[in-house]
Image: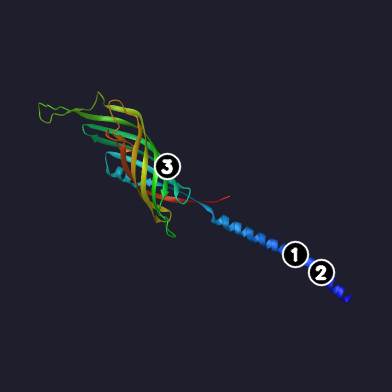
Amino acid sequence: MKKLRIWVFYISILAYGLPILAQEKIQESGSKNELLKDSINSSSKAPLSLRFGLDLYRIGLTQFSNDYSGLELVGDFKISKEFYLAVEIGREEATKQSEQVNFTTDGSYYKLGFDYNMYENLAGLDNQVHLGLRFATSNYRHILNKYTLLDRTPFWPNSANEVTNGFATGKRENLNAQWLEFVAGFKVQLLKNIYLGLSIRLNRLINDTVPDNFDNIYIPGFNQKTDENKFGAGFNYSLTYKIPLSFKKK
């Protein structure tokens, strides 16, 4: 009888204690899973950042040239480790002398595309060596200031016939052009969130509006254009500031 009571006592302890232990194990396992999920969520934040600034080259050229004024704003949005959406918006006014023709072109341009970062940074660095592509469009006008008539048999030496008003001089309005722009460049982090960049551009003209009695010798954002080919070139020298963006992935 005494042994029976002892066995009943042990069985009652086991029957009461096992559910408690099982519940504690479940709670412990659940808390570990929650900690694991939190750590995964906290470590898997999307690597987003917004960077914006301006082109120092056009600002410097505006200050030191009497025949040019311009401003270009630049920006990119980091969507992954390698890819950046990129945009540039600018305005230029330039007076050019091309052989016997003196003219002024002014207008605005917009460029939209992407950059692909090929540089693998060391820990703590955030530099960039990239290739990119832009689709660009420009809206502008030409003003033919003056031109010189060619006289191949002048009676008097240096007798140039310069036309400053009248036929063919004046404005050519509502002009536009579109082109593709291939980009190669780099960005170096100077200070925290501050970057200095240099990029070289090779442009391929797709379409342009040719004005009456004139031609598109210079296009804002595209630079010089010639009759022989539809290629142009340029570069920018940028100073940008980065705003880090942090969002948890759902």
Instruction: Check disc 1 and report the residue beneath it.
Output: 20
Label 2 vs label 3, nearer the camera = 2
Looking at the image, can residue 53 be seen? yes
* x then y, percent, for residue 51: 44, 48
- Residue 180, by quadrant, is top left
- The amino acid beneath tag 3 is Gly
Label 1 vs label 2, nearer the camera = 2
Q: Specify how the rendered protein is coloured.
A: rainbow
Give the farthest residue toward the bottom: 2
- Residue 155, by quadrant, is top left
Q: Note whether 67 is above or below 27 in the view shown.
A: above
Q: How far apart are the alpha carbons under marks 2 and 3?
A: 74 Å
Instruction: Check disc 2 and report the residue beneath it.
Output: 11
* x then y, percent, for residue 169: 26, 26
Instruction: Check disc 3 and report the residue beneath it.
Output: 113
Give the farthest residue toward the right: 1
Q: How far apart are the alpha carbons under marks 1 and 2?
A: 15 Å
Mark 1 or mark 2: name the one nearer the start of the chain.
2
